[in-house]
Every structure is written in C-alpha cells, then in structure tokens.
Amino acid sequence: IGGGTVYIRSDTGAVHAIRLADGAPLWRTSVGAPVEAPPLLAGHGLVVAATADGVVVALERRDGAPRWRTNAGDRVTGSANVWRAPDGLETVLVCGYDGLLYGLSALTGERQWTYETGNMINGSPAVWADTVLFGGCDARFHVVRASDGTGLATTDVGSYIAASPAVADGRVYAGHYGGVLLCADAATGKVHYGRQSLEGV
C-alpha cells in the first residue's frame, strides 16, 4: 500500500492497482505468469513483482506500464525487498528456487550480483543496516553484504527455513521445519536460542 493505492498479485498472471478509499480499479498489467508473492513498492516510482516462472518485472506505479524485466532463473514465491545505498540508489533483492539471492538495479533491472546457497529459497530476504538476511532449504541462516553480495556468515540450524525472517534490534527471527522458532544475531548469524513452537506451526 502506498500513496492511497493498494497493489496486489494474482494467480491469473497480473498485477492490479486499486484505490484504497473505495476499491475502484486503477490499472491491471499482465506479466505473463502467476504472481505468488506480494508486490514490492520500490523507489523511482516502481512496483516490483516476480512470477512463478522466475521473471522479475518492474512496473510504473502510476499506470502499470512496464519499466524492465529480468530473468531470475526459477520460480520466485517470496516478495522482493530493497536495500538503499548511501548515495540513494536502490538494489532490489530477490530469492529464487534456483538457490540464488539476486541483487538487481532498481533503475534498470540489471543484475549487479548473485549469492549462491545450497538449495532453493522460498521466503523473502530481510534487510538490516548494510546486510541481507534470509534462510533457505539448505537449513542455514545467511548473512550477505548488500552492496556486493559477499557472504559474511552462514549458520546451520538443522532444518529447512521455508519462511521469511523478521529483524528487530539487531536480531533475526525465523521458524524452521523442525517446529522451532530461532533467534540469531543479524551481523553474524550466530543462533542465540531456539524455542520449540506450537505443534504443526
């Protein structure tokens, strides 16, 4: 939601913009394949969405006109995120089923860097200061430098992390397939604790 407009995805392969005040449709843009993750509002007046066949698209917020398209290699199910450099330029961050974290120029969609993991990634990356944090089906927390994609730390947590982490006060939180809620240091990935969660969660 931004500027009085709600941007939503659809399994029909389109991104929709509707007016928040009354639900009136403002525009609809087909992107060619189902969009499973919520769209991202980035800078430069863009809405960024990723499709089930691994294409990342940027659309103009005002009218849905396509700005750029980039192939991410495989299915994307988690929302993109964005990191803003000190000079104001933004990097769009996308995780995919090909096991890669992509850093894309928000202006052009050009691939600036990639970071490779050992298995597919389902969730969205989190951003803390100058780092990107996420977990994957390689059963690891990853801490990556946002400016160039350099891996800073990984921590084996013992089970798949298929969800998106949350970050607060320098700590990252995520649940894994073993039914445990983990808390790790956002700078080092070191696990502070793992608490057994509710059965089936």
Image (spheres, grey):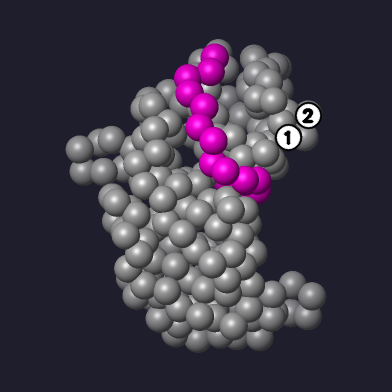
Q: Which residue is mark 2?
A: 12
Tell me the number on the disc at residue 135: none
Q: Position of residue 6 (x, y in %)?
A: 61, 29
* Dominant SS in magenta: loop
Residue 22 visible in this rendered orientation of the protein = no
Write the start and end of the magenta stretch as one range.
65-79
Decide which of tag 2 and tag 1 comes sooner along the chain: 2
Q: Who is closer to the viewer here, 15 or 97?
A: 97
Vertical position of residue 54 compared to residue 186: above or below:
above
At label 1, which amino acid type do we have?
Pro
The image shows residue 128 at horizontal and vertical percentages of: 36, 59
Q: Are marks 2 and 1 in contact (CB under 8 Å)?
A: yes
| x then y, percent, for residue 57 | 54, 29
The residue depicted at 54 percent of the width and 67 percent of the height is: 118
Q: Which residue is mark 1?
A: 34
- In this view, the residue farthest toward the left is 87
Indicate the quadrant where residue 175 lies. bottom right
